[in-house]
Image (tube, helix red, strand yellow):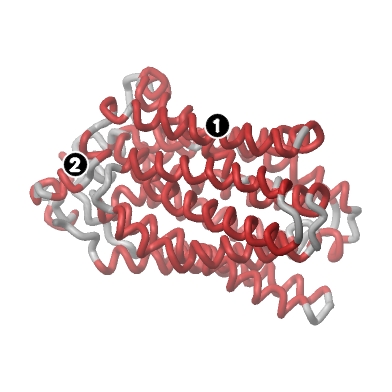
Amino acid sequence: MPQPHSRASWRYTVAMLVDATGSGMYLPLSLLYFHYVTGLPLPAVGATMTVAALLGVVSNPLAGILVDRYGARTVVIGGYLLRSAGFGGYLLVHNQVEMFLAVVLVAFGDRTFPPSIQALISEIAQGTARDRLIARQKSLRNGGLGIGGLTASVLLGVGHNSSYHLVVGLDSVSFVLAAVLIATVPSVVARTRGAGRPSRKGGYRTVARDRSFVRLTLINAPLALCYMTLSMVLPVYLTQTLRTSTGVPGMLYALNTIGIAVVQIPLTRLVIRRARTRTAALGGAVFALSFLLFASSALLPGQGPLLGCLFLATALYTTGELLHSPATSALATGTAPAELRGRYMAFYQLSWALPSAAAPTLFTAGLALSPTGLWLLLATLASGSALALLRMEHRLPEAAVRPWTRDAVPAAVVPAAVVPAPTTVSPVGSRS
């Protein structure tokens, strides 16, 4: 059974750790930086960042085209350099116009990342090795975010503007370092004719005509919505509906973060020989169960039973995320043809981007109408998506659903270094 080349796998994961650590340093001060350093009022800062983020969405489909034309590695590196330049520009911001220009650079770099990194994974690993690599990335990313956040809290404890500048400067450097590491990651999956060249036959129209992939994207959207409940719904539900202390949301969030960092890799090894559709569907079912527990927690008397129920619900929620995330990412990547993988991944990212945009409105309206009803709605959506995943299993490529069946064919993977004729091959990995 082929494994990802050790140098490719570990250089990639180190790059992801560096990326996450830099991101973790900036996340705690994303709004505060411009407020404290430039003196801009928080509403102006928030509005500017929102407009920049909306403009950045344009780069998502553009990234898909660029991946298919120039290769995933090039787009990942370009996105890192854009973000590095943007964060470097933060140090020079003195007014709202300069802030907007810097934030737009970062937003464009951010939005090119999801489709290009998924396409790059397909060049680094194939079969079940891809699931393991995604699991390692998710585990280390959570750890890196925690390390970055802790580093930022220590540096910002000084309470001086120079501390904010230092954090932003380190973030800029971290993206350059991640770009250098990605540039040295060798591709170990065979290259195929036509991959990496601009498609002359439809582009995104070809993706839209792929009914199975469109359906897979639609099915993922309700499950993507589940990922936002821990940060958006739970804190409001706990403090305003259940009247818990303000420290409880932080404890539950820590349980989720630590659980992913510690359990993701061993759990993925445990389910690696299960069909990806079934593993992802199981994750959706566990999500639904956790939401039912959150809904029922309002009926429990006393702090002891209430906290026990909340911690159990959060543990189940974390398990659902651990099961669903690597399986669905590998499933989508494996379903996409190599010559259009960039466009396919950009299209698939809509299943994450659109729920992310709709979540604040949907969640605030649901909490205002009926918190319990919102949890029940989320449970229904998650279980419905899980069932739909199982029902469409036979419509997806066998190698995408059960990758170990392809692992048994050694000829499917050839190191890029031994591909004989550069004029007859292209720089993107083979179809998986």
Q: Is residue 288 left or right of residue 170?
A: left
Decide: is 37 above or below 367.
below
The local crowd at label 2, few if under 14, some if 14 to 19, many if 20 or more residues have their Cα within 10 Å, is some
User: Can residue 134 be seen?
Assistant: yes
Give the residue displayed 57% in from the left and 57% down from the top: 312
Task: Point out the image quarter for the N terminus.
Answer: bottom left
Between label 1 and label 2, give the one nearer the viewer.
1
Give the residue displayed 58% in from the left and 53% down from the top: 313
Which numbered circle lies on residue 425?
2
Q: Is residue 320 left or right of residue 365?
A: left
Three-letter code for the amino acid on which mark 2 is drawn: Val
Give the residue displayed 32% in from the left and 34% down from the top: 336
Is label 1 in contact with label 2 (beta carbons under 8 Å)?
no
Q: Quadrant of residue 55?
A: top right
Mark 1–mark 2 Cα distance, whole angstroms, equals 44 Å
The local crowd at label 1, few if under 14, some if 14 to 19, many if 20 or more residues have their Cα within 10 Å, is many
Q: Quadrant of residue 269?
A: bottom left
Three-letter code for the amino acid on which mark 1 is drawn: Leu
Q: Quadrant of residue 197?
A: top left
Q: Nearer the viewer, residue 247 or 199?
A: 247
Which numbered circle lies on residue 49?
none
Decide: is 149 above or below 291.
below
Please provide percent x and percent y for residue 294: 65, 47
The numbered mark, 1 or 2, whose residue comes first in the sequence reads: 1
Please provide percent x and percent y for residue 298: 73, 47
Decide: is 432 above or below 311.
above
Please provide percent x and percent y for residue 75: 44, 48
Task: Point out the image quarter for the C terminus.
Answer: top left
Q: Which residue is mark 1?
A: 381
Q: Residue furthest front?
A: 301
Q: Is residue 45 left or right of residue 65?
A: right
